[in-house]
Amino acid sequence: MASRRLALNLKQAVRSKAALSAIRPQRAFASPVSHGAITESTTLSNGFTIATEHSPWAQTSTVGVWIDAGSRAETDKTNGTAHFLEHLAFKGTQKRTQQQLELEIENMGGHLNAYTSRENTVYFAKSFNSDVPQTVDILSDILQNSKLEPSAIERERDVILREQEEVDKQLEEVVFDHLHATAFQGQPLGRTILGPKENIESISRDDLTSYIKTNYTADRMVLVGAGGIPHQELVKLAEKYFANVPTSPSATGAHPAIQKAKPDFVGSEVRIRDDTLPTANIALAVEGVSWKDDDYFTGLVTQAIVGNWDRAMGNSPYLGSKLSTFMHQWRLANSFMSFSTSYSDTGLWGIYLVSDQFDRLDDLVHFTLKEWCRLSYQVSEAEVERAKAQLKASILLSLDGTTAVAEDIGRQIITTGRRLSPEEVERVVGQITANDVMEFARRRLWDRDLAISAVGKIEGLFDYQRIRGNMSLNIS
């Protein structure tokens, strides 16, 4: 990966510094430094959007197409179609066989990939700047001209079924899939991304082509570029390769309407007891915030105050959060991870707990929710500042590399229509106070319904109403 700063030899550096000092005052060491790049956006007449962040010094670029459709755009019958399509994308087009496609990418030293989430499908590639036109051609080809051959469909059924078997062995994935299923039960957001086994075995070519026709439309696509590709160059490539992508017949068509209907959060639980497992794995969540919610960053700061912890982190009693210190002292858990998962119109805010202290699960949940209740009226500025520093570092460090930047641009443009710059993010987070956190907790956590997902040796987990009562504890 190319360096993000221009290389200057020592003599050039000294000469440049002298020239600059003659025309502007010297900065103090603590002065903020601008990120130096802006996000440009253009929309074609068919509604197809191009968004870029150009870095003139970068020798490589990541380009990709973000599609505003994932498993949430499916029905019960077709659940799993979006993920199935992702698997078939690289199996051959009208212009390229699978072997030709793989060889073309390999010969230019590129990297082609894709993924499916509940709300998005993404196809992206990383290559040298000079190969971007060829890369965009390939992306356009697989999105518009995939053959979807019956033989390839049958082969991928087995591949996806094996993938599902592997996912089912990952307890965290299982717990979070069940958490979505109970929190948004009977609704599109509650379904899994891979779909049930019976769907994987029965999805037809007609289901796949229907999904493409309904969801792979220009007004739901963003071509993203990050790195050395100039904005206008990518716009010209989009005009060449994507100008004929059709637009949705109606912005309120059947499938988009299903996808965009705000789901109802249901206070409920799902428990899968399996005494052969070595741990109890428990997720607790309230309804969280969407990407566009005014509370989005406050929710992240509040989550950071609760923090993450793992017994393997060491023996220090002075860990980052109060809950970490308590868990360490009383050995109630093996680990915990707080989370704030956001979608376009809702979210889940909560914690994932893992414990082998099976006779103390009630204490584990009780004291976790006691910490949540504390957030409503007893938060110090010191812990807020620590959480803000961790959050800003996490967000800004995650933007290291063209692929990470492209991901940030694509997600934000698809979800909100604009991208917050790193400077804007830093400023918004920096303004959050302890009072903001407590107000967030009072509105979002205090005496709110819970969704609970528990898997493993969970006999000692108390009933739902007992746990629900812990959402309004008096800790004074």
Image (cartoon, grey):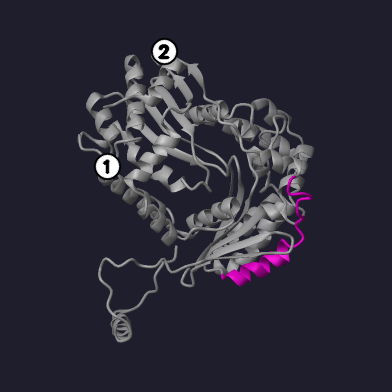
Q: Where is residue 158? Give x, y as percent.
A: 65, 32
Residue occupying image coordinates x 48% and y 30%: 170
Answer with the quarter of the image where residue 243 lies.
Answer: bottom right
Q: Which residue is mark 2?
A: 459
Residue occupying image coordinates x 69% and y 38%: 258
Amino acid on which the number 1 mark rests in the picture:
Ser
User: In the picture shown, does residue 303 fall above or below 196?
Assistant: below
Question: Where residue 380 is drawn, which disc sits there?
Answer: 1
| Label 1 residue SS | loop
Answer with the quarter of the image where residue 424 lies.
Answer: bottom left
The question of residue 321 being in magenta is answered with no
Q: Where is residue 300? Give x, y as percent.
A: 41, 44
Amino acid on which the number 2 mark rests in the picture:
Glu
Q: Residues within 10 Å of mark 2 (few under 14, many from 20)?
A: some
| Pick the front one: 366 or 193 | 366
| Pick the front one: 106 or 377 | 377
* Left or right of 356 in this view: 127: right
Span highlighted in magenta in the image = 230-252
| Label 2 residue SS | loop
